[in-house]
Image (cartoon, rainbow, N blue to C red):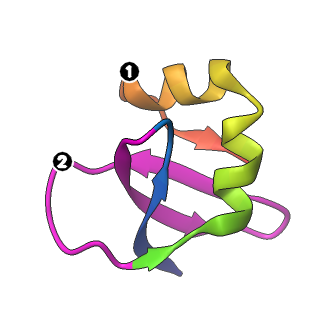
Amino acid sequence: MQTIGYINYQDEKILLLVRQNTYYRSLKIRKSGKNGIHFTDEEIHLNNNRDLVDDLKAGKVIGI
């Protein structure tokens, strides 16, 4: 199952495509579209891990 949403990272809104897997969620950045839901748990995790956000902004799919 997949859904769309966003996180706030240092006063920047990052739009995401989120796919639910068995033990984790995979996140991919989107360029446009509706905001969707606010992923607060993922936002907290990514605000503590700058390397994951850099990978996400580079176009990679990350799993958390």
Residues shaded magenta = 11-36
Which residue appears at 29% of the width and 72% of the height? 35
Is disc 1 surrounded by few (<14), some (14 to 19) or many (20+) residues within 10 Å?
Answer: few
Residue 58 - label: 1
Question: Going from the N terminus, do you reach mark 1 or mark 2 first?
Answer: 2
Residue 26 - label: none
- Asked if marks 1 and 2 touch (Cβ < 8 Å), the reply is no
Residue closest to the far right: 23
Residue 1 in magenta? no
Amino acid marked by disc 1: Ala
| Element at label 2 | loop
Give coordinates of residue 41: x percent, y percent.
74, 64
Q: Is residue 40 toward the left or the right of residue 59 in the image?
A: right
Which residue, given by chain and number where applicable, does mark 2 sit on?
31
Which residue appears at 63% of the width and 27% of the height? 52
Amino acid marked by disc 2: Lys
Give coordinates of residue 13: x percent, y percent.
35, 50
Instruction: Looking at the picture, tell me which residue is in the foreground, 61 or 55.
Output: 55
